[in-house]
Image: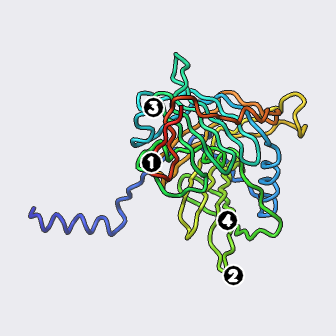
Amino acid sequence: MRIGSLLLALTTILSSGCVTIKRRHEVTPQEIRPQLASSEEKLLADYNDQVRAAQSLQATVDLIPSTGTTYSGVIEDYHDVQGFILAQRPANVRVIGQAPVVAKNIFDMVSDGKEFRIYIPSKNTFLVGPTALIRPSSKPIENLRPQHIVEALFWPEFPPGAKVLFEEFDIDSGRFYILTQLRELEGGKLEIARKIWYNRADLKVSRVQLFGAGGRLESDIEYSDWQPVSAAPGATPVSAPVNYAHDIHIWRPQDDYKLEIRILKLTLNETIAPDRFELAQPAGTQLTRVGEDTPEVKP
C-alpha cells in the first residue's frame, strides 16, 4: 500500500470515530479536598482576629537560604542555620543565627522599626541603617534586614474603612480567596498595598504579598504547616490556642534573596524585657552605616 493511501485510510478511521484515545488519571481520596466557602466580611474578621491574637513571640527556628549568593561570606558554609527569634508588636525584633553543632553566633540582628543593627562576628563588622532605606546594596548581607522578618511574622490590621477588593482565584494547584488592600495616593489615585491569599482547602492564609510605590512587589511570603499554639502562662491576652504557621518562605525580589523560616519551638504572648531587643556595637568592630560609603572604626 502506498504511503498516501495509508494516510488516507488512517484519516478516515479517525474522522469516523472508530478510534477513541483516552487518558485517565486516578485521583486518590486523599487528593480530594472540599473547597470551603467564606465571604469578604468573614475573612476580614478572621484576619484581624489572627493579628490581635499574636502580640509577641519567642521561637527556635531553622533559617534556610534558598537560592543565589545571598549571605555570601557570612553563612555560605551552612545550608541550615539554627537560630532564635524574639519579636514584639509593633516592630521590635531580634534574630540570632548560629552555626550548627558548635552553637557559635554567625549574626545577631535587631530592629525597632526605625533602625536596624546587625553584628557579624566572623567579619568583625557592625552594620547600622534606617529601615526605610530602599537602595539595594551590592553586598548581599546588607539586604537581609530584621524588619523583613518581622513583617512576615506580624501582619498589620485592616483598619476600619480600608479599601479592599475581594476575589476568587482558581488555578491547577488550588482554589483561593484573595483580599487586596488598596493604598490611596494624592489626587485620589489608588494602588495595590498588599494581597492576602486564603487557601480554600482550609481557609488558612497561604500567601501575603506586599507592594511598594508604583505597584512594585517588595515581599512575597508563603505560609504553611499551621499548628495550634497555646499562650504562655500568664500571657496577655489570655485566649484559646492560636493557629500559627510553622513554615514561612520569604522572597524579596528587589533585594535578591530568599529565606525559609522553619519554626521548631514557639511561645506566644509572653512578656519580653525591652533590653533583649538592644544590640550595642562590640568594641573593636568596624562600623558600617548602610547607605553611606565610608565605614567607621570604633574602639
Contact flag, marks 4 and 2 (Cβ < 8 Å): no
Which numbered disc, 3 or 4, marks the residue closer to the eye?
A: 3
Disc marking residue 188:
2
Task: Look at the picture and state if 162 lies above or below 19.
Answer: below
Residue at horizontal 82 percent and vertical 48 percent from the top: 52
Front-lying residue, 216 or 136 = 136
Nearest to N terminus: mark 3 or mark 1: 3
Q: CA distance from mark 3 to mark 1?
A: 16 Å
* Whether residue 100 is situated above or below residue 232 in the rendered picture: above
Looking at the image, is 154 positioned above or below residue 299?
below
Q: Residues within 10 Å of mark 3 (few under 14, many from 20)?
A: few
Q: Which residue is mark 4?
A: 180
In the rendered image, which quarter is residue 233 located in?
top right
Q: Is disc 2 surrounded by few (<14), some (14 to 19) or many (20+) residues within 10 Å? A: few
Disc 4 to disc 2, how far (Cα)? 17 Å
Label 4 vs label 1, nearer the camera: 1
Badge 4 amino acid: Thr
Q: Which mark is residue 123?
A: 3
Residue extending furthest top?
102
**Sequence-wise first label, 4 or 2:** 4
Inspect the image, locate mark 3, and give the three-letter code of the amino acid beneath it.
Lys
Distance CA(mark 4)–CA(mark 1): 42 Å
* Numbered disc 4: secondary structure: strand
Q: Amino acid at mark 1?
A: Thr
Q: Position of residue 26 (x, y in %)?
A: 51, 44
**Residue at numbered disc 1:** 294
Residues at marks 2 and 1, CA–CA distance in whole angstroms: 42 Å
Quadrant in the picture for residue 82: top right
Q: Is residue 3 left or right of residue 162?
A: left
